[in-house]
Image: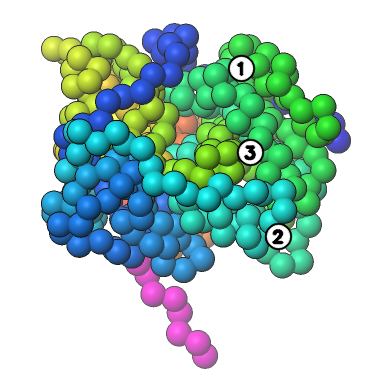
Amino acid sequence: MGFFGDFAHGIHPPEEKALTRALPIRRMPYPDELVLPLRQHAGKEAKLCVKVGDRVERGDAIGLADGFMSVPIHASAAGTVTVIDWWPHPDGSMAQAVHLAVDKYAPQVPRPRLVPKWQGLAVDQVVKAVQDAGVVGLGGAAFPTHVKLVPPKGSIVNTLIINGAECEPYLTSDHRTMVEYPERVHFGCRVMMQTLGVMRAVIGVERNKPDAIAALERTRPPDLDIRILPLTVKYPQGAEKMLIKAVTGVEVPSGKLPVAVGVVVQNVGSLAAIAEVFDTGMPLIERIVTVTGHGLRRPANLIVPVGTRLRDLLAYCDGVTNDAAEVILGGPMMGMSQANLDAPVIKGTTGVVVLAAHETRGDTVYPCIHCGRCLDACPVFLNPSLLGDFARVQRYPEMADHHLSDCMLCGACSYVCPSNIPLSQLFQAGKAALRRVPPPAAA
């Protein structure tokens, strides 16, 4: 297989990674209260399995998986369930959540649990162990990881691609994971390769992370066919379909999944989480989060308990500056601006970016001048200008006809638009509107 390392189109926004890329990962102390939404992953939200007054230990389930396309939610600290209510979610909606008063005198040692010996497990047992641990994609989408271990019947997977691109500006959590925990990445890769029956893996890392590339090369297992591939620094290099194109030169057909071209893609953080499951037996109850931005007093890469409220996280980083203007969960390109700092860190939270006033755009939107910059930027060759015209007059069926489903909401078109048209937000609204349209009745 030839390696390419690039894809067509894309953009080059300022990286802004210097704020945190050299900062070692540190552990954040437990806050007084954790708020754990039952909806933290793609698919069906977890089913509540605790009640007010229950005492839970670190790692105990508070929500159970509701079917195969679901994962459980676990307590990220020992404490007592105080409230179960509807709470602000990072996506802007309200979600059922469990409030946990953290026991400040508890040693926070999890209950003794059986560590699965993955080498002797059948595929379905490995899949169940990963699901029971609540592992999801840690690159932002939070897709249940165990589902990727079970390709659709009849499909053939020949390559596992590991996403270490981390192309979003500001974010460095994946970078630091590869630098500080490369053995975990390789261990997780080993488990996935054996479970999928794949003999070849490629870890794609952008060239602006030479220390991560070196760490992965230094710890690469000699008995596995794992290639560390330096990638062109370009956004959105870390998008699943763009990464496949950069690594294999093959384009995933419109409307198809990566498995259609014999590929499964997984994030480096998710591999490290899989390694944790089969090394210690611990479920996914904390994650590495980059807290950064020119509007933050003390940027950091932190191990944060899932359920930590944004205000507690920002306070631990000495708070925001006087000119802080916007708090974004995720990166500035695909992340979501937060209206409520009581929203918690969830499993898919890659970073918290605090933008200063000079980094934000005004709200004024000007008419489209049909310059074509959005066409040159779109990595999947859509016509964002035309889609934007349809969106503004709510002609959603025409948007579907012009392949809105292929849009990954990367924000490249919005970034280059000289008229400040919020194209990505318009497309997101269009996708939501189309999901609400009932399917046509059967003849």
The disc at residue 188 is 3
Residue in the picture at 38% in, 62% down: 64
Residue beneath the point at 28% across and 11% down: 298
Mark pair 1, 2: CA separation: 33 Å
Q: Judging from the image, what secondary structure is the residue with disc 2 in? A: loop
Q: Which percent across, then down, holds residue 168?
A: 47, 26
How far is the residue under mark 1 from the one under mark 3? Answer: 16 Å
Q: Quadrant of residue 292?
A: top left
Residue 101 position, x and y percent, is 17, 43
Q: Is 48 above or below relative to 31?
A: below
Tell whether label 3 touches label 1 (CB within 8 Å): no
Query: Do the residues bearing badges 1 and 2 touch, measured as CB atoms within 8 Å?
Result: no
Tell me the amino acid under the disc marked 1: Ala
Q: Of label 2 and label 3, which has the lower sequence position? A: 2
Marker disc for residue 122: 2
Point 37% across, 32% down: residue = 330
> In the figure, residue 417 lies in which quadrant?
top left
Whether the magenta-drawn stretch holds residue 442 is answered as: yes
- Kind of residue sitting beneath label 3: Gly
Number of the front mark, 1 or 2: 2
Along the polypeptide, which appears first: circle 1 or circle 3? 3
Identify the element where label 3 is drawn.
helix
Q: Which mark is residue 212?
A: 1
**Camera-side residue: 439 or 49?**
49
Instruction: Tell me where the magenta segment starts and ends, as one range.
Output: 433-443
Residue found at the far bottom of this picture: 443
Q: CA distance from mark 2 to mark 3?
A: 16 Å
- Closer to us: mark 2 or mark 3? 2
